[in-house]
Amino acid sequence: MNEPRSSVPIEVYIDYICPFCYVGNARLQRIAQRYPVTIQYRFVEIHPDNPPQGRPLSELGYPPEQWRRMMDNLNAMVSQEGLPMGERTFTTNSRKALLLAQATLDERPVAFPALNEALFQAYFTEGRNIGEEAVLRELAQHHGIEDLLTPAWETALYRQRLLEHVEAAQQIGLTGVPTVVVADQPFAGAVSMETLEEALRRQGL
């Protein structure tokens, strides 16, 4: 029988324009309230070709039937979690949002949880374009991290940090986001609470 552990490490690979990451993040927050876990966020840009001004979701190129199944699945998860979800019509470039998140996580970790939620809420609930600097600047001002904008966007440090996340993703054979890694075991997709809890029980929690 495993000895109880003081804290189990969880890594999560996300992008703020990924709707299943929105769901997965909510589930991880519930897990963190119930279990002694340490969550490490790794940011992966899923559509680097998207322009900052955004583009219609229809241009992502999914076959209609596949898109319908994905949205049905997403809507069921959103309903199950009781998450607010606005009407999305566009996708955008998330690079500057990810750089800001990384800088905040590294330099002002106490501010990261609120920013993390704010980025998801801005895009998925309020329909705001988090690819636009003005939107990100407003969020940064609201959360007291405006001083991190310049280093986040203009220095090589945080671009290198994002590259490190990509390299880590390649090492575990990541095929998409969200991916959750519990004590070195990866789980792809918006992992159910039951799956997460079972993985933690195997770690002695």
Image (cartoon, rainbow, N blue to C red):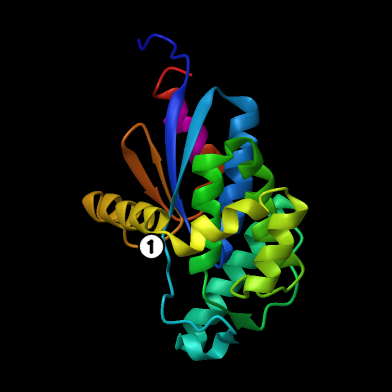
Residue 149 position within the rendered picture, expressed as x and y whole percent measured from the top left: 58, 59
Kind of residue sitting beneath label 1: Gly
167 on left or right of 115: left
Residue 143 vs 108, above or below: the answer is: below
Number of marks in the rendered image: 1
Residue 26 position within the rendered picture, expressed as x and y whole percent measured from the top left: 64, 47
Q: Which residues are magenta?
A: 195-200
Task: Indicate yes or no whether the magenta region holds residue 198.
Answer: yes
103 on left or right of 1: right
Residue 174 position within the rendered picture, expressed as x and y whole percent measured from the top left: 31, 56
Task: Indicate yes or no whether the magenta region holds residue 194.
Answer: no
The residue at the point 44 percent across, 11 percent down is 4
Q: Which residue is mark 1?
A: 176
Q: Secondary structure at mark 1?
A: loop
Residue 164 position within the rendered picture, expressed as x and y whole percent measured from the top left: 31, 52
Q: Is residue 78 visible?
A: no
Residue placed most toward the observer, 6 or 129: 129
Label 1, residues with CA under 10 Å away: few <14, some 14-19, many ≥20: some
Q: Main secondary structure of the magenta part?
A: helix
Residue 53 vs 26, above or below: the answer is: below
50 on left or right of 164: right
Q: Is residue 9 visible?
A: yes
The residue at the point 63 percent across, 75 percent down is 132
